[in-house]
Image (cartoon, grey):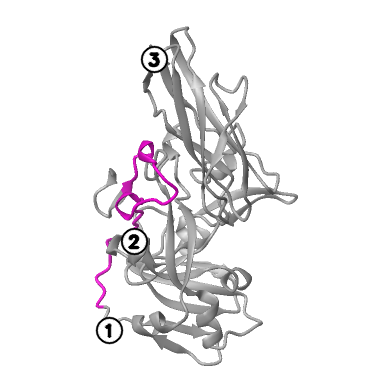
């Protein structure tokens, strides 16, 4: 793993090591805002409260007794690929590996909300983790905060999973043990780790990580408006060749990677080996799984002419969304889904 920060731990998968559809736990990126909380699972309980008919506390054993569900879902950090932005911006300097795809097993959020008698007139569901600390940079509140985000009630009752297993084994501490949310199709900040409390509310949640951080500008008729980050954008990434790799001339080279979107299937991935001047279709491999990445590959006959080459990948999904070739500056240091240039040299 590439260490981007030691404490709190922020670890990136070397994306060139992409092998199969499922990312091994040991290679799955780790994003931490605060130190990993120390949790005694013998005393731990998940609290469900707020606009519910009967507030309840559930132990891990009680959650495991509920009918389980396993899903495959890709989670990408909203700042993944920040290293490609020029000029350099603040934040963890992720390259390509702050993304992973895993099998998650747990209980649908809908199940526990219904058990607590969730009010149908509620507005949002707040997910609160046990990780906490002080915010380093202004604007910031005084004292410590818990990491928390909210979901619209419609999304909470749809496909969100409360996961206690990852790839068939209990969650590791760095991935949210004993329980985390998995919010399919949304950026990783929504998939709260070390989940300890769920609050159903009739009012929009305006917490720090909802309205100050993990937000971007959106152009509307009345001018730019700050909105929370939510759905992942359509995106393809090149795993190999890797940045600055030396490629022999006049030979065949396997170019491969992964592509993903939110709430839609990847229908095609195109590859350019000349900096975007021309594009060719790649081959999609494996099966299409909702909200999980799709692997792709292409056999490139490398040119005889020596010199630098710029490779680009471009994805299209079933909703008709096409990965843009240029960056949207309104997104600040987040939602980096423009075609990323992989510079190689034929030599």
- How far, Cα to Cα, is label 2 from label 1? 20 Å
Residue at x 59%, y 56% (from the top left corner): 227
Q: Tell me if label 2 and label 1 are in contact, CB under 8 Å.
A: no
- Can residue 218 be seen by looking at this rendering? yes
Image location (x, y in percent) of residue 84: 45, 33
Q: Secondary structure at mark 1?
A: loop
- Distance between mark 3 and mark 2 Cα atoms: 40 Å
Q: Is residue 196 above or below residue 3?
A: below
Q: Quadrant of the N terminus?
A: top left
Crowd around label 1: few <14 · some 14–19 · many ≥20 (10 Å): few
- Separation of disc 1 and disc 3 at Cα? 59 Å
Q: Is residue 219 left or right of residue 189?
A: right
Q: Which residue is mark 1?
A: 43
Type of secondary structure dominating the magenta stretch: loop
The foreground one among 233 and 333 is 233
Mark 3 touches mark 2? (CB < 8 Å): no
| Magenta part of the chain | 11-40
Which residue is located at x 31 percent, y 48 percent? 11
Mark toward the start of the polypeptide (3 vs 2): 2
Please, is residue 241 above or below residue 37 in the view? above
**Does the magenta-highlighted stretch encompass residue 15?**
yes
Earlier in the chain: of badge 1 and badge 3, it is 1
Quadrant of the snapshot with the C terminus: top left
Disc 2: which residue: 175
Q: Dot 3, crowdedness within 10 Å: few (<14), some or many (≥20)?
A: some
Residue lying at the far top of the rendered structure:
305
- Expressed as whole percent of the image width and height from the top left, the position of residue 2 reads 29, 42
Note whether 238 is above or below 230 in the view shown: above
Residue that numbered label 3 is attached to: 248
């Amino acid at each position: 793993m590439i260490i981007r920060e030691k404490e709190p731990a922020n670890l990136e998968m070397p994306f060139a090591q992409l092998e199969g559809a499922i990312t091994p736990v040991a290679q799955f990126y780790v994003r931490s805002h605060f130190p990993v909380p120390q949790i005694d699972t013998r005393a731990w309980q998940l609290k469900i409260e707020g606009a519910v008919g009967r507030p309840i506390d559930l132990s891990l054993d009680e959650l495991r007794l509920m009918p389980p569900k396993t899903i495959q879902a890709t989670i990408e950090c909203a700042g993944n690929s920040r290293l490609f932005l020029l000029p350099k911006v603040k934040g963890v300097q992720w390259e390509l590996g702050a993304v992973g795809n895993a099998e998650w097993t747990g209980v649908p959020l809908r199940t526990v909300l219904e058990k607590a008698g969730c009010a149908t007139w509620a507005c949002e569901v707040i997910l609160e983790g046990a990780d906490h600390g002080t915010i380093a940079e202004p604007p910031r509140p005084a004292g410590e905060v818990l990491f928390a985000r909210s979901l619209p009630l419609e999304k909470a009752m749809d496909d969100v999973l409360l996961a206690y297993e990852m790839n068939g084994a209990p969650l590791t501490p760095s991935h949210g043990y004993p329980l985390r949310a998995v919010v399919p199709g949304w950026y990783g900040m929504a998939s709260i780790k070390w989940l300890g409390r769920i609050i159903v509310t009739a009012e929009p949640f305006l917490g720090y990580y909802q309205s100050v951080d993990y937000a971007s500008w959106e152009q509307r008729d009345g001018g730019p408006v700050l909105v929370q980050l939510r759905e992942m954008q359509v995106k393809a990434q090149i795993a190999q060749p890797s940045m600055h790799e030396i490629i022999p001339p006049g030979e065949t080279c396997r170019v491969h990677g992964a592509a993903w979107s939110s709430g839609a299937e990847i229908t095609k991935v195109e590859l350019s080996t000349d900096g975007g001047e021309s594009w060719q279709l790649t081959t999609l491999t494996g099966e299409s799984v909702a909200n999980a990445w799709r692997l792709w590959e292409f056999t490139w006959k490398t040119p005889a002419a020596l010199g630098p080459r710029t490779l680009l990948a471009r994805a299209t999904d079933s909703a008709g969304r096409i990965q843009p070739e240029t960056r949207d500056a309104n997104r600040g240091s987040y939602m980096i889904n423009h075609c990323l240039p992989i510079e190689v040299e034929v030599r």
